[in-house]
Image (tube, rainbow, N blue to C red):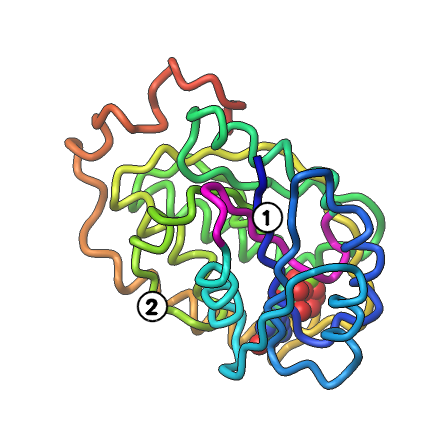
Amino acid sequence: MEIDVVLPCLNEAGALPWVLSRMPPGYRAIVADNGSVDDSAAIAAGYGARVVPVPQRGFGAACHAGLLAATSDVVCVMDADASFDPGDLPTVADPVLAGQADLMMGRRSVRGKGAWPLHARIGNRVLAAELRRRVGVPVRDLGPMRAARREPLLALAMSDRRFGYPLEMVVRAAEAGWRISETDVPYYPRTGKSKVTGTLGGTVRTVRDMRRVLASIASPASPASLASPASLASPATPVQATS
Ligand SMILES: Nc1nc2c(ncn2[C@@H]2O[C@H](COP(=O)(O)OP(=O)(O)OP(=O)(O)O)[C@@H](O)[C@H]2O)c(=O)[nH]1
Ligand SMILES: [Mg+2]
């Protein structure tokens, strides 16, 4: 069984060798190159990754193009900056492969200093709490290492092409009644210069994009949707508990 791994990439030449050399057997890297001006594309190709050039800038644009290029039934998405170890992908993908979860998310467990700035951690917690309250999804983190089935994921028709994309994926999945769960994955200090959470501009852009997604939530979670058989609340779901 092959699993495509979509890696959104903007100037990650320093990180790609470590990341791509650690893909577990059966996991195929698709590097969605978002106009890198360093050697990211050549390095990725040299490590045997499929490189998809994505002219439209933005995290969501890169992820979406990578998903369109993917062909496997189950797909993973993860950052390309060496903040995650591809060796942890099976932990996230296995519950989806086993039919125990529809969207599996890696909950970041910090390893090493500077992996996750305080403001980003707090913002992430606030957003996760908002999601629990408004769409009934019991996640504690909106981490970017994820797994799902490709066709249903594309059918969620996410429209954000920037930094609201990770949040929109969870919102649309919850609205569709998906079983969403999370499991711990180590989170390391990124390789290379911080572009988003470690910068003021990146943080402001992310907050703006995510607020737009929150505003798109139709209504608070209805009792009916929470009681659906696909609900995470089901004690029969044999995936790691999140609370
Ligand atoms: N910043 C940015 N990253 C992109 C873009 N397109 C793809 N990426 C990639 O998306 C992934 C996540 O971006 P990061 O810059 O790591 O964002 P972050 O983890 O929130 O914050 P930092 O690691 O502190 O920069 C990385 O692999 C980037 O290379 C884009 O348009 N902007
Ligand atoms: Mg990062």
Does any portion of residue 243 appear in the rendered image?
no
Does any portion of residue 16 appear in the rendered image?
yes
Query: Image point 84% across, 68% down: which residue?
Result: 14
Label 1 Cα neighbours within 10 Å, binned few <14 / some 14-19 / many ≥20: many
User: Label 1 is placed on what type of residue?
Assistant: Met
Residue range corresponding to the magenta coloring: 71-84
- Look at the image and say whether residue 81 sits in the magenta stretch: yes
Query: Image point 46% across, 47% down: which residue?
Result: 128
Q: Nearer the viewer, residue 150 or 116?
A: 150
User: Label 2 is placed on what type of residue?
Assistant: Ser
Left or right of 45? Residue 238 is left
**Residue 195 horizontal/vertical position (percent):** 68, 74
Task: Name the disc covering residue 159, or none.
Answer: 2
- For mark 1, give the secondary structure: loop
Label 2 Cα neighbours within 10 Å, binned few <14 / some 14-19 / many ≥20: some
Q: Are marks 1 and 2 in contact (CB under 8 Å)?
A: no
Query: Image point 48% across, 41% down: which residue?
Result: 74
Split into quadrants, the picture shows ligand 1 in the one at bottom right
Q: Nearer the viewer, residue 190 or 93?
A: 93
Residue to which mark 1 is pinned: 145
Left or right of 218? Residue 179 is right
**Residue 181 horizontal/vertical position (percent):** 46, 33
